[in-house]
Amino acid sequence: MKAVLAMVVQRLLLGLLTLLIVSVVIFASVELLPGDFAEAILGQAATEETLQAYRDELGLERPAVERYVEWLGGALTGDFGQSLASGQPISELIGARFGNTIFLAAMAAAIAIPLALTLGILAALWRNSIFDRGASVTTLTAISFPEFFVAYVLILVLAINLQIFPALANISPDTGVLDRLYNSALPALTLTLVITAHMMRMTRAAIINLLALPYVEMARLKGATPRRVIVRHALPNAIAPIVNVIALNLGYLITGVVIVEVVFVYPGLGQLLVDSVARRDLPLVQAACLVFAATFILLNLIADIASIVSNPRLLRPR
Amino acid sequence: MTDLVSPTLKLLRTTPPTAIFGVLVVFAYAFVAVFAPWLAPYGESEIVGGRHEVWSQAHPLGTDQVGRDMLTRLIYGARNTLAIAFLTTVLAFALGTLLGLLAATLGRWADQVISRIVDVIMAIPALIFALLLLTIFGTSLTALVLVIAVLDAARVFRLARAVAMGIVVMDYVEAAKLRGEGLWWVIRHEILPNAAPPLVAEFGLRFCFVFLSISALSFLGLGIQPPLADWGSMVRENATLITFGDITPLLPAGAIALLTVSVNFIVDHMLYKASGLKE
């Protein structure tokens, strides 16, 4: 038990360190600007006086390290400063939208995870059957599609031709839960289709690897029923790879969500990020990137820890 | 019986239909890309009609939001989109493979430094990192190609290093080093030839990934900029048509999808063959 705890703590510290380095990268990349921040925002036409005044206002004259510490300190307490484009506090802009994004991602994950695991395990058990081959071609096709292609096909079929779901995700803070689910159905379905395919392929591969191991063969040879081989022998060891598959794909959701939000005009963090990139609203872009990167790192961390905690070999040391 | 069947036919028989389909599609795309100016009925950015005209004899796929011929844009899009994605993948491979082989051969601190930098790049989702870098460097074509190439090189590096790690411990590499051959000679003559096969399969996968990333960025309006014809931007520019039940905006999106599916079919078959699994 002690070994497990030590490993978990080690992973936690490593995750924190990664997050810290990533925050440095996100902050420092702005320092790579050909001119400086003020020139980038005000443009070539600005006079030296306006540039200087702007630099003073943002405190750009101070050393980068000092500004980084201040930025990180603010970020930790939820204060990212003001948006350059609208002048509103960034945390206000991000807060509600991040909630919406999490809602959409959770909805997609809730459908995709059970679906993908069931299909993946079945495909692994019935390897090389017609079901497996069909699933392999279908999922390979699905992961090759760009998200916006899947999204527009769904819009055309389900929103325009059959008129089951709305084409645009109309969501405001006072939308009720049922309306929210209904309005987010198409974006969630798009994400579900894309990650289910990924997740199912990876689950299948993980289970097939496992079934090829000597101890599974041993269990079969000593006459255990197929059901017992899978439930008692294979599944406990399958948890770690499966948790990894889930976490990897939730990480994939993070990038998928950006495009899907833009297609459906869903008021999430991804759409805000894309708009801010177009407006070159650097503080807002930095904040949004930090939130996305932190979520990504957190997911990987959870996967790591879950696979340590669920590993029977670590839990019952000899 | 078997000696009556020529090797080509035998290859065709053992290759799954999906892989054959993939190869045919890739050749068709390459043909269209190379001969675009001869195939397209109009000029790339020529305005030849009203906005959003419906499909007709003169414009088989209608016109776009400023009155350019859709079919012409699609054909030129093959040329621009494919060329840019291909160039980016080649750059990513050159950089990633070079660094990967160097890291594996030099070992010690060189390996540590490059590997840790790559770890940091991989800790941020690629699309998010690309958006951050494009905000900083602006949305020029050069910036786009370089940003995607560098981010992708990190992924190539991982594979190249892993493959090369297995090769540098071989006796023939040791022998070459003892003979007094230089670092470059060892990398070029001993390591690269042996690391090539897995890297070739990876090239197909990376190309798909780069192609999808660039299309996604173009779709978001942050990738390839007008007036260059490009499939991602074409979807974005004509997306409103879909609300009237017009499938025109799906054509460039479908063109992207068809190519990535085909390349994936080919790579999938290559990997299957390389893995040595039999029925």
Image (cartoon, coloured by chain):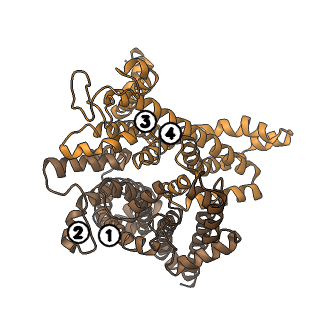
Question: Mark 2 and mark 1 in contact (Cβ < 8 Å)?
Answer: yes
Chain of residue at mark 4? B
The answer to whether the residues at label 3 and label 1 have Cβ atoms under 8 Å apart is no
Residue denoted by label 1: A103
Please name the amino acid that badge 1 sits on: Phe
Note the chain letter of the orange one: B
Q: Amino acid at mark 2?
A: Arg
* Closest to the observer, B27 or A47: A47
Closest to the camera, between mark 1 and mark 2, is 2
Which residue bears the numbered disc 2? A180
**How far separated are the C-alphas under marks 3 and 2?**
41 Å
Q: In the rendering, what colour is chain A?
A: brown
Quick one: label 1, few (<14), some, or many (20+) residues within 10 Å? some
Mark 1 vs mark 2, CA separation in Å: 9 Å
Give the residue number, with chain letter if any, for mark 3: B266
Query: Tag 3: residue type?
Result: Ile
What SS does tag 4 mark?
helix
Marks 2 and 4 sit apart, C-alpha to C-alpha, by 48 Å
Please give the chain letter of the residue carrying mark 2.
A
Q: Nearer the viewer, mark 1 or mark 4?
A: 1
Q: Are marks 3 and 1 on the same chain?
A: no
Q: Position of residue A315 (x, y in %)?
A: 49, 79
**Marks 3 & 4 on one chain:** yes
The residue sitting at 13% across, 50% down in the picture is: A162
Chain of residue at mark 3: B
Q: Is residue B168 above or below residue A222?
A: above
Q: Are marks 3 and 2 on the same chain?
A: no
Looking at the image, residue A167 sits to the left or right of residue A43; the answer is left
Q: Residue at position x 42%, y 23% from top?
A: B36
